[in-house]
Amino acid sequence: MAAVVSDDMFDNYESTKSGFFTLASACIWLGIFNSIQSICKEHDIIRSEYRQGMRMTSYICANTMWQAVLCIVQSVIIYAVCLAFGFFRDCPSDGAMMPSFIEYFITIFLLTFGSSVMGIMVSSISGNPTTAMTIMPFVLILQLIMSGVLFELSGFSETVANITFSKWGMSAFGSSGDMNSLEHAMAKKLPEMAQMIADQYPVDEVYDHEAGTLITAW
C-alpha cells in the first residue's frame, strides 16, 4: 500500500485523501483481525474458568490490555514501513498541535487499537469463530462506506458515521496533514479555473488544521 500511494501523497487534495483512506483502512483491517476470534474460540475455557470464580471484567480487561500492547508494536511497524516508502515525506512538519509525525503515530495506534476493541466486541457476541469471520466483512464494509471518502454522507448516514472509526481516523489524518490547504488535482492542471473549482469544492471542516478538530477526532 505504501509503495503504491506514497508518490502522490501531499501532491494534491484528492491523492492525499485517497492515501489517508488507504492507511486508515489498513489500520482498521489489521485491528479487527487481531481480536475477531479472541473470545469466541475460547468459549469452553471461559465457561469453565467462570464456574471456578473468574471475573468476566478481569478477563476482558486482560484481553484489552494485551491488544493495546500488540497494537503499539504493530503501529511502530506500520509507521516504519510508511517512513521507508516516503509516505510522509512531503507532509507539513507542524501538525495541528504538535509535530506531525507524533500526531500520525497516535492516530495510527488509536485506529488499530479501537478496531481491536471492536473485534473483541464482535467476538464476544459470536457463538464460534466461523460466525465471527462471517460478521467481520459487514463490519469492515460499514467502516469503509461511512468514512466519507467513497460517498458523500448526509442525514441519517452522516449520523451513523459518527460512531465509526473510519470517519474520525480520516478527520485526524486530514487535520494533521492540513489537507484543506492542498490544491485539487484539476486546479493544478487548469490554473485558470482554480477559483471556480475551489468554489465547487468547499472546505471540509472535519479536516480543519486545528487542535480542536484533532482532539475531537482522537
Image (cartoon, rainbow, N blue to C red):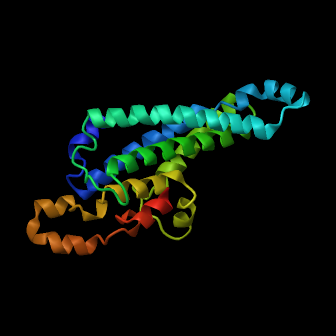
Split into 4 quadrants, where in the image is the N terminus? top left
Seen from the viewer's position, the closer of residues 77 and 99 is: 99
Q: Is residue 179 above or below residue 156?
A: above
Q: How many marks are shown on the rendered structure?
A: 0
Report the side of 57 relative to 204 (left or right).
right
Classify residue 70 by image quadrant.
top right
**Residue visible at 15% across and 69% down?**
194
Image coordinates for residue 5, horizontal then vertical, percent = 27, 41
Left or right placement of residue 82 versus residue 36 in this view: left
Q: Farthest residue in the left direction? A: 192
Residue 126 seen in this snapshot: no
Picture coordinates of residue 183, whole percent (x, y): 20, 62
Name the residue nearer the viewer: 164 or 116. Answer: 116
Q: Is residue 54 visible?
A: yes
Where is residue 136? Give x, y as percent: 59, 39
Left or right of 142 on screen, residue 214:
left
Q: Does residue 60 appear to the left or right of 112 in the view shown?
A: right
Q: Residue at x 23, y 61 (%)?
A: 182
Quarter of the image holding residue 79? top left
Residue 47 in which image quadrant: top right
Q: Residue visible at 19% across and 74% down?
A: 196
In the image, residue 167 above or below residue 199: above
- Tell me the residue at 23%/43% (across/down): 89
Where is residue 201 shown, x and y percent of the image?
29, 70
